Image (cartoon, rainbow, N blue to C red):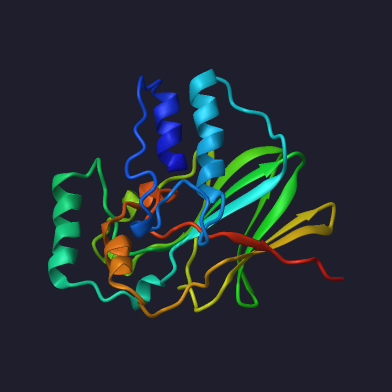
Amino acid sequence: MAYIWRQAIEAESKYVMLQTWNDLSEDSSIMPESNHGWAFFELNKYYSKWYHTGKEPAVEKEKILFFHHPQMASGVKVPEGRMQMVDHNMIKNPDVPVTPPTDYIGVMAFLKAPATISVQLSNTVIAKQDFPAGVHLWLAYKPAQHAVEKKWTDVYPKESNWLSVTVLDKPFTDSYVYLSVHRDNDRIGLFRSQRPIVEAVTCPHCLHHLIGESCHNWFSGFSLACRCQHVPCRD
């Protein structure tokens, strides 16, 4: 969603339509709810203000939003017909890519001063990035094996002046997602996602969500967002 908002703002689009904006059945609601809390609301609040005023909003309060699938891509058994549909779309509509199931974590950070953000699964830090003050988007992902085999990795978002990208070389593991924020060698925040990433698909909707989504829409709905729980810092 953040990716598309940026495209709309840069293109000076006359209209922006938020499709199925409170679809609770697909876990893609903007309204606050139990799975992802205020994450989508805060994201849309920021970009809609930018869109309407034409000026990037200042950081009023430091906060971290992060998003991920509830299932690992390796645990999704994609029906052959659905994967053929992905392949067909890649060939016929390369400008509107639909990627195979992909493990990723998307971060949106609102910072008043420089900080270092780390992404951790279980006890392992899988990605780490330094950011200056401001609002930053960061995508850390493991390319799907199917995309690697087909040599279609160009489908994934690229590093830009407003998007930081970290390409991971190891698959995800069953775990909650933790984000730690450090500043001046002190940890100032530690956050945990509301739901863990698991290997088993627990509901039929999740299979559809993981297959049918474009990685360029990595901040859209489809069970991506997670409500973050603040974990008190410990010495």
Q: Residue 20 occupies which quadrant of the picture?
A: top left
Q: What residue is shown at x 68% (from left), y 50% (from top)?
A: 130
Percent x, y of residue 167: 48, 59
Residue beneath the point at 71% across and 53% down: 116
Pick the front one: 23 or 129: 23
Q: Position of residue 32 (x, y in %)?
A: 52, 51
Left or right, 131 with respect to 108, comes to right
Figure check: 205 above or below 117: below
Up-down relation of residue 35 to residue 44 (above or below): below
The quarter holding residue 204 reads: bottom left
- Residue 178 visible here: yes
Q: Nearer the viewer, residue 59 or 40?
A: 40
Can residue 166 be seen here? The reply is no
Asked whether, in this view, residue 169 is left or right of residue 55, the answer is left
> Residue drawn at (75%, 39%), measured in percent from left and top?
112
Name which residue lies at 34% across and 58% down: 26
Please state which of residues 161 and 99 is positioned toward the viewer in this rendering: 99
Q: Quadrant of the C terminus?
A: bottom right
64 left or right of 94 in image = right
In the displayed structure, does residue 24 sit left or right of residue 132? left
- Reply above or below: 142 against 21: below
In this rendering, is residue 206 above or below 157?
A: below
Task: Give residue 74's position: percent from left, percent from top.
Answer: 36, 75
The spot of residue 120 in percent (x, y) is 62, 68
Mark count: 0
**In the rendered image, which quarter contains the N terminus?**
top left
Residue found at the very far right of the displayed protein: 235
